[in-house]
């Protein structure tokens, strides 16, 4: 293995490349994986969930760009117990005005805190990994780490092919 005869600078660069690659792939994979899981949960709950009317009571979020996620508070009753959570208000209203007063949700009968709303948002839709920002934030270091590793490999191959200057 070439790592045994690598210089200290090459080892540092290799560690940096691996750290960038692993962090980038972790963020990218986690974000996309969570989005996929959330979408599949929404599909499952539309089929297996119990349809329940919900009341929208509050709106929160910024009125201006960059001022936070626009969200609405959802209250619902299931088997005599009241539950509530926040979901993004996308597709329901522009969020610049009060949201509609009612909404249909599908509740997981095994876990009543878990639901999907008619706008396709679940109780997990506000989780930080749902942000699209994590896709490029993860892709950039992953690509950088991959390019560093590739350039190190090319440099190593070229060094083997060319005659040594010390001989």
Image (cartoon, grey):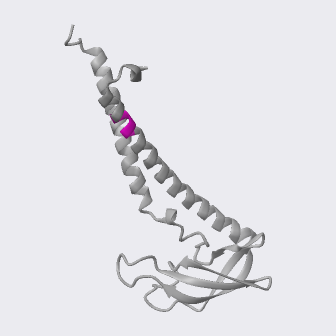
Q: Is residue 14 magenta?
A: yes
Report the predominant secondary structure element of the magenta stretch: helix
Residue 134 found in image quarter = bottom left
Residue 39 found in image quarter = bottom right
Q: Is residue 148 left or right of residue 51?
A: left
Vertical side of 3 occupied by 61: above or below: below
Vertical side of 12 occupied by 107: above or below: below
- Residue shown at 79% from the left, 86% from the top: 80
Residue 93 lies, in percent from the top left, at: 49, 85
Residue 162 lies, in percent from the top left, at: 24, 15
Q: Is residue 48 magenta?
A: no
Residue 10 lies, in percent from the top left, at: 32, 29
- Which residues fall within the magenta stretch? 13-17
Count of numbered badges drawn on the protein: 0
Closer to the camera in the image, 164 or 147: 164
Closer to the camera in the image, 110 or 166: 166
């Amino acid at each position: 293995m070439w790592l045994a005869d690598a210089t200290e600078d090459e080892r540092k660069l290799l560690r940096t490349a691996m750290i960038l690659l692993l962090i980038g792939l972790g963020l990218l994979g986690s974000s996309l994986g969570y989005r996929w899981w959330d979408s599949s949960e929404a599909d499952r709950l539309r089929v297996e969930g119990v349809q329940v009317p919900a009341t929208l009571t509050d709106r929160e979020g910024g009125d201006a760009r960059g001022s936070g996620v626009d969200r609405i508070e959802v209250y619902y009753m299931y088997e005599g117990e009241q539950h509530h959570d926040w979901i993004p208000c996308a597709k329901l209203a522009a969020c610049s005005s009060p949201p509609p007063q009612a909404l249909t949700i599908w509740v997981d009968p095994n876990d009543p805190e878990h639901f999907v709303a008619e706008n396709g948002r679940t109780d997990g839709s506000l989780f930080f990994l749902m942000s699209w920002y994590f896709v490029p934030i993860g892709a950039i270091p992953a690509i950088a780490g991959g390019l560093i590793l590739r350039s190190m490999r090319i440099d190593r191959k070229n060094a083997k092919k060319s005659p040594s200057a010390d001989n």
